[in-house]
Structures are given as C-alpha cells and as structure tokens.
Amino acid sequence: MSDSHQPLSSKQTLLLILVPMLGTFVSMRLYLHLVGVQHVYPGGYLVHHLFTGVLITIPAAFVLAFEIRQRSLAFAARIALGVGSAMILDEIVFLVMTKASDEDYVSRLSLWGGLGFVTFATILLCIVYRMQRNRPK
C-alpha cells in the first residue's frame, strides 16, 4: 500500500502541531519544576533547549515549505514543528529578560513568559486553522 494518499486535513495539521507543542511545553515545565534544571554540554558547550528547538523546527519548516506526498513525512514534519516550537517559545523570556541562571529558569517570569508565548502561538495556530478551514476548495 502506498504512503502517498490524500493530503492531511486542516484539522489533522492543527492537531499534529498543537498537541505536541502543548505536550512538550507542559512536560518540560513539569520536569524543570519537579526534577530541577539539568544542563546538556555537548563538546563542553551549554546548549539550551531553544537551540535544540531551532535544530528541530528549521528542517521541519523546510519540509513543509514543499508539497509533501509521503504521509509519514507530512505527519513527522508537523509533529517536529510542534515540539521544536514549544522548545523555542519556552526559552525566549528566560534568555532575553533574565540573567539566565538556574533560579531564573524556574522563576515566575520565565514560566509566565513561556506560557504567554505558547498561548500566543496557540491562538495564532487556531486563527490560521480557521482561515484555512473556511477557504473555498
């Protein structure tokens, strides 16, 4: 059976981006606030999850920029876009508005900032979905 059937619906696209984005954000924040801040130092350099998010999001965006006929790739790119977006949005306020200490990362400012950006992204995604859904075929 071929993997290149019908394109994904607007609702499938919405859910494949939104659910991983929200799940990733909630999971990261629960981990940080319950387990604590853990750092990753590949090659001796501190890598924030913002950078990991960028490394996930950019390839996903490139794949989505073209018409994807492979259903599994279409699914994976949308899921990656949701996961990567959450990782990026979560760290914007932390890296821009604090001194980026471990205490700052679990601060109210960082938490509310990440929540604000994820909320904004959710609203934007829903607006785009509604515009796409109501578009004549």
Image (tube, helix red, strand yellow):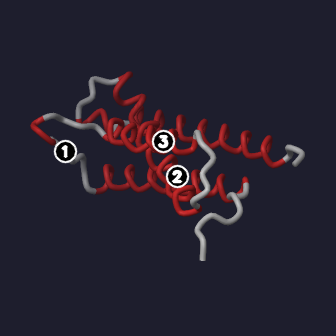
Residue type highlighted by circle 3: Ser
Q: Is residue 121 left or right of residue 104?
A: right
Disc tally is 3
Residue 119 place in picture, x, y as percent: 59, 40
Q: Which dot marks residue 22?
A: 2
Q: Is residue 41 left or right of residue 36?
A: left
Mark 1 sits on what residue?
40
Residue type highlighted by circle 1: Val
When asked about the image quadrant of residue 2, the answer is: bottom right
Label pair 3/1, CB-CB below 8 angstroms: no
Residue 87 place in picture, x, y as percent: 41, 43
> How far is disc 3 from disc 2 in space, using C-alphas?
10 Å
Residue 118 place in picture, x, y as percent: 54, 41
Indicate the secondary structure of the residue bearing disc 1.
Answer: loop
Residue that appears at 47% across and 33% down: 113
Q: Which dot marks residue 92?
A: none
